[in-house]
Image (spheres, grey):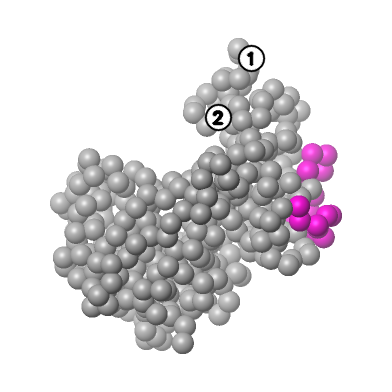
Amino acid sequence: MKLNVIDLFSGCGGLSKGFEEAGFNILLGIDNDKDALATFEQNHHNSKAVNIDLSNKDFLKDINNIIDNNKVDVILAGPPCQGFSLTGPRNFDDPRNSLYLSVFKSVEYYRPKSFVIENVYGLMTMWKGKVFEEIKKKFSEELNYDVSSTLINMADYGVPQLRKRVFIVGIDKALGKQFSFPLPSHNKNNYVSCEEALSDLPSRENDIGINEEDFPSPPKTDYQKKIRNGLDKLFNHVGTEHKDFVKRIIAMVPEGGNHKDLPEGVGTSRKFNEAWTRYHSKLPSKTIDTGHRNHFHYKWNRVPTVRENARLQSFKDDFIFLGTKTRQNFQVGNAVPPLFAEILAKKIKAYIA
């Protein structure tokens, strides 16, 4: 029998997709982004995706009504942590931390065999690390979970992207097992590169393309073969129509370069760290964010398409994004790479199955 999962703050479902690929049954995804919820339902078979206010005192009743009182074996969550930046580490129950508290209440109520919390690196350093330690302590001491945590660079697990995220994994102490994270499979000498991930896709240099088309060529790399997953159709690979002067500026940025490589007086409207950054064909990409207007294709003078960003996030090509292109990019940038999520899910499964 498959283990049941609910995904709080699910977004489009990158984390839960990895768990689904690992053989888990995804009961429910919860988010407040309607486009992300539509994408979630499109790509998670037999799963429901709903907008539930997790700050509402009756949110658990709302969840139960939807999952029909099915047992919950794993809870996934990526809650915002901004409240702690205002309240400090000792005020877990402050109303401004209500969304993080909803994760605690869910784990307390359902008593899953395991839970996973994902967040940005800043959670580890907030209030000199005291917030991070208080969160782990609360789950460990009050709910009796063995809690492990680490900082993961997705490139170390075969994702073609330099993306660092914090993961907290709890295992019910009643199981008598202490969790250890999966070991990396890659390093700087064999990271999956942008070229390995994207070189089979149409250039979109002279036309923006359409939302659904046939692949023009077979996969060229092992990563492309895995990510195509036997699919013969290409989705979400629609380009952006840049103005001529923008194309001229992008063309001045060398492979792997950024705004610092532009001539004096050019591109002055964007001079922050990530501005006018061109990917390097032989390296993983920079961190995919929710805007996608500051990074450029390693070869073509344009921003990446939704499908290109999705591949750099390790979404398989049969994962179709819904909503406007802006909202699709937002979903991609907010997601946990499914490839790493699947690796993590398989490791957790070995502890709780």
Instruction: Measure the C-alpha gap from mark 2 to mark 1.
Output: 14 Å
Q: Is residue 31 visible in the rendered structure shown here?
A: no
Tell me the quarter of the picture where residue 172 sits: bottom left
Of 228 and 222, which appears nearest the observer? 222
* Residue farthest front in this picture: 189
User: For mark 2, what is the residue?
Assistant: 275
Secondary structure of the residue carrying tag 2 is loop
Q: What stretch of residues is rendered in magenta?
A: 203-220
**Point 45% across, 47% down: residue:** 153
Could you tell me which residue is drawn at 74 percent across and 36 percent down? 300
Mark 1 is on which residue type?
Answer: Pro
Q: Residue at x 34, y 53 (%)?
A: 150
Res. 352 mark: none
Residue in the picture at 79% in, 39% down: 205
- Residue behind mark 1: 263
Can the viewer see residue 231 in this picture?
yes
Tell me which label, 2 or 1, sits earlier in the chain: 1
Task: Point out residue 173 in the picture as x, y percentages from the top left corner.
Answer: 23, 73
